Image (spheres, rainbow, N blue to C red):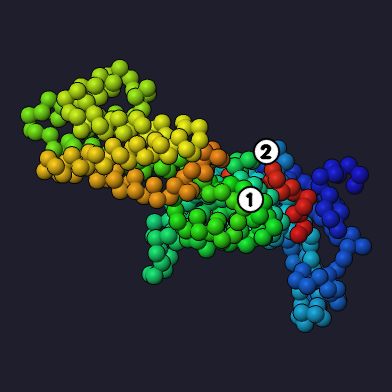
């Protein structure tokens, strides 16, 4: 039938007929096996002997405009000497993910799952939710076998909360996280490991090998000790850079604790009592040049009335300018100055017999100063893990649109699909079809 379109040709088969049902919006494509088609076992690919029967196959293929396409053929059975039992013959274009679909159709479904929720894809093609989810998972598992972690020199490492409940009774909180590794140059996720323990990052470094580890120059992380220990062990040439946004976040938390303590020390009839709580609490964390007119007036009134709040404002402004320093030496001067001001306020509170409101800042400063050897690397390599924080937001939206994930392996692969290279844009269809 010379008029049969080329896209209705299937390996080992010829199209003997096709029919259109306008009532059901279905195109039926009938196939017959070619004489030269290999008659081999579907499990071991060894030749089959004799024909012990046959059964009808109806496979769903790519839709044609508004028509659903169904491929109909007979599948023969024969005796396999290797398996020592009767087996069905191998048909190359049947999807590995489902015996009811062609490979083209299964790949197409998986491609749509790269940018749309599984539930929406299932609704559009009139398939079951679990069917489409299973195809998406198996497709990504196949792609993972072909995935090679790219060479990197600058990476960001961060954790993302994967699940609330433990899978096992003895599971600790660290195992409920994923460790997400991103390439700072390409801004793509290159690997996701379960848990946020040292072993999770160790796994990544072992996968890329010692030679690739030596090429890593910078690793941006938060102050999580396990990540730093892993980098120190595997990447001898790498500089660990603490993310400035995590440091500022920790600083703001300490400032807020001090604000609450200072608010608690105010007399009940203080004119600034209402200005140091409620909606005004965020004003104390803002940089002065980012406050609007009303916020600036509020802070001016508070610091004019209370010297402790004035000291807190000075410390906060000085710290928010810390990362604007041009070198480590000037940054250390700023750090030392901030520490001196904090200690002076603590000493003044002790002398006056007041509660030590600035203790949260003392704890914060001592923790940061003890890690100066790592902190100063920022001024040599001014990189951050802000990319990882952006990825975390994408992961959270992915979790919301899927209403959570029970299968953690599926969730992990989905992150690499949406935020990384585990998709059809980077792993092309011809490389996987038939594998």
| Residue 18 drawn at (x, y percent) | 80, 47
Nearer-the-camera pick, 116 or 378: 378
In this picture, residue 376 sits left or right of residue 134 = left
Circle 1 Cα neighbour tier, 10 Å, few/some/many (<14 / 14–19 / ≥20): many
Where 362 sits versus 101, above or below? Answer: above
Rounded to the nearest whole Å, what is the CA distance between mark 1 and mark 2? Answer: 51 Å
Residue located 19% across and 23% down the image = 304
Q: Residue furthest left?
A: 269
Q: Which residue is mark 1?
A: 216
Considering the numbered disc 1 on the image, is that residue within a helix, a strand or a loop? Answer: loop
| Residue 77 drawn at (x, y percent) | 79, 72
Contact? badges 1 and 2 (CB < 8 Å): no
In this picture, residue 117 sits left or right of residue 32 = left
Answer with the quarter of the image where residue 334 lies: top left
Nearer-the-camera pick, 425 or 227: 227
Q: Is residue 156 visible?
A: yes
Foreground tag (1 vs 2): 1
Q: Which residue is mark 2?
A: 66
Residue located 38% across and 39% down the image = 335
| Residue 379 drawn at (x, y percent) | 52, 38
| Residue 154 drawn at (x, y percent) | 61, 45
In this picture, residue 362 sits left or right of residue 105 = left
Circle 2 Cα neighbour tier, 10 Å, few/some/many (<14 / 14–19 / ≥20): few
Specify which label sits upstream in the sequence, 1 or 2: 2
């Amino acid at each position: 039938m010379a008029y049969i379109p080329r896209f209705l040709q299937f390996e080992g088969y010829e199209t003997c007929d096709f029919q259109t049902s306008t009532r059901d919006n279905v195109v039926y494509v009938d196939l017959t096996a070619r004489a030269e088609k290999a008659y081999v076992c579907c499990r071991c690919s060894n030749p089959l002997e004799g024909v012990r029967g046959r059964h009808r196959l109806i496979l769903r293929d790519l839709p044609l405009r508004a028509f659903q396409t169904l491929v109909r053929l007979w599948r023969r059975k024969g005796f396999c000497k290797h398996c020592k039992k009767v087996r069905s013959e191998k048909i190359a274009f049947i999807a590995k993910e489902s015996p009811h679909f062609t490979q083209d159709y299964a790949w197409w479904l998986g491609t749509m799952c790269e940018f749309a929720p599984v539930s929406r894809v299932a609704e559009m093609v009139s398939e079951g939710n679990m069917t489409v989810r299973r195809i998406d998972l198996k497709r990504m598992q196949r792609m993972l076998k072909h995935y090679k972690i790219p060479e990197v020199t600058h990476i960001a490492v961060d954790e993302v909360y994967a699940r609330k409940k433990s899978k096992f009774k003895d599971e600790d909180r660290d195992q409920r996280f994923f460790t997400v590794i991103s390439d700072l140059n390409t801004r793509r996720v290159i690997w996701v490991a379960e848990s946020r323990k040292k072993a999770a990052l160790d796994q990544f470094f072992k996968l890329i090998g010692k030679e690739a580890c030596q090429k890593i120059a910078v690793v941006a992380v938060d102050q999580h000790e396990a990540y730093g220990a892993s980098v120190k062990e595997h990447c001898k040439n790498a500089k660990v850079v603490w993310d400035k946004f995590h440091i500022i976040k920790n600083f703001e938390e300490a400032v807020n604790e001090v604000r609450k303590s200072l608010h608690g020390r105010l007399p009940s009839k203080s004119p600034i009592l209402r200005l140091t709580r409620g909606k005004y609490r965020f004003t104390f964390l803002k940089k002065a040049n980012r406050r609007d007119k009303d916020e600036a007036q509020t802070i001016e009134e508070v610091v004019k009335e209370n010297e402790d709040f004035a000291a807190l404002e000075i410390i906060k402004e000085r710290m928010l300018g810390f990362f604007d320093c041009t070198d480590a030496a000037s940054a250390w001067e700023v750090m030392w100055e901030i520490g001196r001001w904090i200690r002076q306020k603590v000493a003044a509170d002790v002398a006056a017999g007041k509660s030590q409101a600035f203790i949260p800042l003392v704890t914060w400063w001592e923790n940061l100063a003890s890690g100066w050897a790592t902190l100063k690397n920022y001024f040599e390599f001014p990189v951050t893990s802000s990319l990882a924080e952006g990825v975390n937001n994408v992961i959270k939206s992915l979790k919301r649109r899927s209403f959570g994930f029970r299968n953690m392996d599926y969730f992990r692969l989905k992150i690499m699909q949406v935020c990384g290279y585990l998709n059809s844009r980077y792993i092309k269809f011809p490389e996987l079809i038939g594998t």
